[in-house]
Image: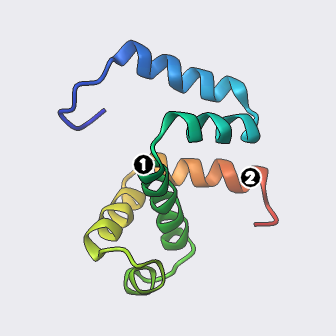
Amino acid sequence: MKESISVNEEAYAELCEALAIAADPELIGEFLVCLLTPKELAEVSSRWALVREISKGTTQREVARTMGLSLCKITRGARELKKENSPFKRMIDVYLAAKPEV
């Protein structure tokens, strides 16, 4: 984790492992609804959606207009996608490999 937020590293690693093991989108969805507040869930979902749109080639301004998000938030996502070995990009690639029709 890059930010200076206090994180229980052991619990965080265990959570990541549990999500990876579950491999059941319905269970993970139900879990996230229980774990996160509605606002947090909306934030996480909008970040995924904006990164997906940027990865498709949609301009930052178009994403801002259609999703009602700030350019600052979108720029952060776009910057993360451009990083070498970007976790955002890798997760998108994993998703698209499993769902080529998307």
The relative height of residue 70 versus residue 35 in the rendered view (above or below) is below
Query: Residue 6: x, y in percent?
Result: 22, 25
Q: Quadrant of the C terminus?
A: bottom right
In-front residue for pair 78/82: 78
Label 1 to label 2: alpha-carbon separation: 27 Å
Residue, x 47% and y 40% (percent of image)? 36
- The number of numbered badges drawn on the structure is 2
Q: Which residue is mark 1?
A: 40
| Mark 1: secondary structure | helix
Residue found 69% across the figure and 23% down from its top:
21
What percent of the width, then of the height, locates residue 32? 57, 38
Q: Residue furthest right?
A: 101
Quick one: label 1 or label 2, which is nearer the N terminus? 1
Tag 1: amino acid = Glu
Dot 2 crowding, Cα within 10 Å, few <14, some 14–19, many 20+: few
Vertical placement of 17 versus 84: above or below?
Answer: above
**Disc 1 or disc 2, which is closer to the eye?**
1
User: Would you call the spot at circle 1 few (<14 residues within 10 Å), some (14-19), or many (20 or more)?
Assistant: few
Q: Which of the image's four quarters has the N terminus?
A: top left
Q: Secondary structure at mark 2?
A: helix
- Left or right: residue 11 compared with residue 23: left
Q: Position of residue 87 (x, y in %)?
A: 47, 45
Q: Quadrant of residue 82?
A: bottom left
Q: Which residue is mark 2?
A: 97
Image point (45%, 44%), residue name: 37
Question: Residue 14 at what x, y percent from top left?
Answer: 51, 16
Q: Residue furthest left?
A: 4
Q: Tell me which corner region of the image, top left, top right, bottom left or bottom right, holds residue 20.
A: top right
Q: Given the image, on which type of amino acid does mark 2 rest?
A: Ala
Q: Is residue 5 left or right of residue 102?
A: left
